[in-house]
Amino acid sequence: MESEGKKRETRNRIALTGAAAVATVAVTCAIAALSAHIRNRRRKVPSGSSVRINMSSSEILRLADHIIAKSKEVHDKVAAVPLDKVSYANTILPLAELEAHQFPLLQSCAFPKLVSVSEDIRKASMEAERRIDAHFSACSKREDVYRVIKAFAARGDGLSSEVKRFAQYLVQDFERNGMSLTSSKREELERLRAQIDELSMRYIRNLNDDSKFLLLRDEELLGLPTEFLKSLEKADNAKFKILLRSHQISPILELCKVGSTRKSVAMAYGKRCEVNLSVLEKLVQLRHKLARLLGYMNYADYAIDHRMANSSAKVFEFLEKISGSLTDLASKELSLLMEMKRKEGGEIQFGSEDMPYYVKRIKEQQLDLDFGLLKHYFPINLVLSGIFKICQDLFGLRFDEILDAEVWHQDVKLFSVFDLGTCELMGHFYLDLYTREGKYGHTCVVALQNGSWINNIRQIPVALLISQLQKEVDGSPGLLRFSEVVNLFHEFGHVVQHICNRARFARFSGLRLDSDFVEIPSLLLENWCYESDSLKLISGFYQDITKPIDDEMCRSLKRWRFSFSALKLKQEILYCLFDQIIHSTENVDMVGLFKHLHSKVMLGLPMLDGLNPASCFPNAAIGFEATCYSRLWSEVFAVDLFATKFRDDIFNQNTGMHFRNKVLAAGAAKDPLEILSDFLGREPSIQAFLESRAHSI
C-alpha cells in the first residue's frame, strides 16, 4: 500500500495539475464568453432562444393563431398516415418537433400575463392562452391521431427506450381523455369533466367570496405587534376587524397571549363556507364515476397512476409508516406544550388551537434566534451571488449576465449558463425579482423554452424566476427574511434543474416531470440554507458584507429547522390521509371521518366542536385532489439524498456532478424511482427522514 506521505504527494500533484487545467479552461471560457458577449451586444437576445419578448397585444393574439394553425397542420398530417405505414419519421418525429418548436412560442404568449406592466397585454396573454388551451384540449381528443400513435406504439421493435416512453406517454394522454372508450361513454366523460370543473371552481369561489370577520377589542389581541394592529381595519365601535384570511389568522394563533381569542379565531376560521361540504361531497362522487369510467377502482388510483407513488395503497403505507414512526416524538412534544400551558393557565384544557402559540414560545425559549436581526445578514444581491457560487462549485456551472439584453422591465436581468469545464452554453434564465403592480404575487419558476435534441439539433432551455421581493430604497439594500432566502434557493434549484436537463424530447424536459419527483431536487438544495459553510457564503451584514452570520446563529438555525416538527408533520399527515380516504372510498361521512382521524393521528388531542375542515380544504377540491401526500413524499426522499450523498461534504463537486448527470440530466426520460435508485445505489428510503426528526425537541 502507498505510504501516507506518498499519498499526500500524489494528491498535491493532482491538485497542481487540476489548477493548471482550470487555468487553461478559464482562458478558453473567457474567449468564448467575450465572443458570445460581442454577438449578444449585436442582437440583444439570448443565443438559441426562440422566446419572444415585448410583443404587443395584437402580436400576442396573432402568434396564438399561428401556433394553432401550425399545430392543426401537423396533427392532420399525422392523422393521414396509413396504420400499416406508421414510422418514427412520419408519426413521432413530427409531433416531437412541433412540441419543441412551439413550446417557447406558446410561452411567449402566456408568460406576459404574469409580468407585464400593461393591463391590455396581460388580458391579451390570458386570451391567447385560452385559445391555445382550447385547441390542445381538442387535439388530445382526436381519435384519428390516437389510432396512428397507438399503431406505432404497438410495434415496439427496434425503438430506443426514450422513443418508446414518448409514444407511451402520448397514448396514455389520449386514453385518459377517453379515446379508448365508446363514443357514448366519451360523451359521459365530457359531461363529468364539465361538472367537476364547475363544482371545483364553485368551491374555490365560495372560499374567496367568504367575507365573514370577527370584531375584537384591543385587550383581546394582547401580544400582537403594533405593526400588525395598525394594518387592521377598525369598525365603528373601535374594535379591530379580523378577516378570516390566513394572513390575519396565522399571526393571531401564533402570537396572541389570550387563549380565549385563539380559540374563537380558530373556531371561526375552521367553520368557514359550510356550504362547501356538500360541494366537496358531490365533487368526490363525480370523480369516482370518472375514474370507474376509465377503468379504475376509485379516483385515488386514477390520480396516482403513472406517478412515482404508483398506487393509493402505497401512499397509505407511506403515510401510516411516517405517522407511526413520529408518534413517540410527537407525544413528547405535546407533553411539553401542555405543561407550559398548565404553568400559565391552570387546568384549562390544551386544544389544537393552542399549538402554534406554544410551539413558538418553546422554540423562542430553547433557541436564541432573532429573525428581525437575522434579516440584516441577507441583502438580496449577496444572497443571489452566494447561491450562484454554491451552484457553480457543486454542479460545475458558470453564470454570466447579459448586460444589454432585451427585457420587459428595467429590473429584469438575463443570465447565460455555461458548463464550467467545457464552456458549452447550457441555457439561459431571466430573473424578475422585485415587486411591482400587476405582477404575479408568488415566487415561482416558469419554463420558457424546454431543452431537446431532435435530428441532431440541440434546443437549449430558457427559464424565468419570478418573485415579489422588496427592492433597494434610498440607499438601503433590499433585505430578505430567512424564509425568503430558503424560498429563493428552492426556486433557483428549479432553474438549475431546468437548465441541466438533457432529455431528448421537450416533453421530458424542463419541469415537465413526475409531480412526485419534480420538487425533490429543489427540496434537496434547501439543505444548503442550514449548513454553516454555505450559510456564510450567502450572508453578510448589510453595513459590512464581509461579516457573515456567526457559528452560533448557524447552529441555532439548524436546530430551529426541525424543532417541534413531529406534531406539525402529524397534522399534515392527517390532511393527507383525509384526502386519500375520501378519494379511495365511496360515500364517506366527511365530518365523522375527520373527527376520527384527528383523534387517531393527533394523539387524542380533541378537535374543536363544530369545525368542518372539509369545507375549507382547497387542496382536496382542486389541484391536489388525491395527491396531497406529494409534498411530504418529495421531502422525505430529498432528505435521503442529502443524508446519503451530500451531508458529509456539501461542496463535493464529484457528488454534485454525479447528481447533475444522473438525476437532473435524465428529466422525465426515465422512471424517477430508477433515477434515484441509480444515484443512491439502492432504492430511496424514509429512514434518513425519520432520523433527522429524532432529536428535534
Image: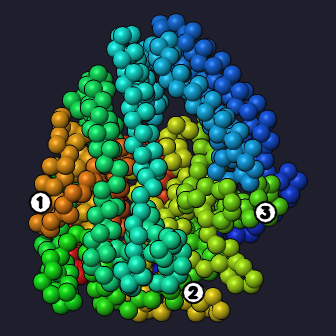
Depth order, front residue of 558/19: 558
In what element is the residue under mark 2?
helix
Kind of residue at badge 1: Lys
Q: Position of residue 175 (x, y in %)?
A: 38, 23
User: Label 1 to label 2, Cα distance in Å?
Assistant: 43 Å
| For the residues bearing labels 3 and 1, Cβ distance under 8 angstroms | no
Depth order, front residue of 140/369: 369
| For the residues bearing labels 1 and 2, Cβ distance under 8 angstroms | no
Kind of residue at badge 3: Gln
Q: Which mark is residue 410?
A: 3
Q: Which residue is mark 1?
A: 600
Q: Residues within 10 Å of mark 3 (few under 14, many from 20)?
A: few
Q: From where the camera sits, is residue 1 visible?
A: no
Q: Which mark is residue 237?
A: none
- 294 displayed left or right of 486: left
Nearest to the eye among marks 3 and 1: give it: 1
Q: Which residue is mark 2?
A: 376
- Residue under the point 27% across and 79% down: 259
- Residue under the point 45% across and 89% down: 370
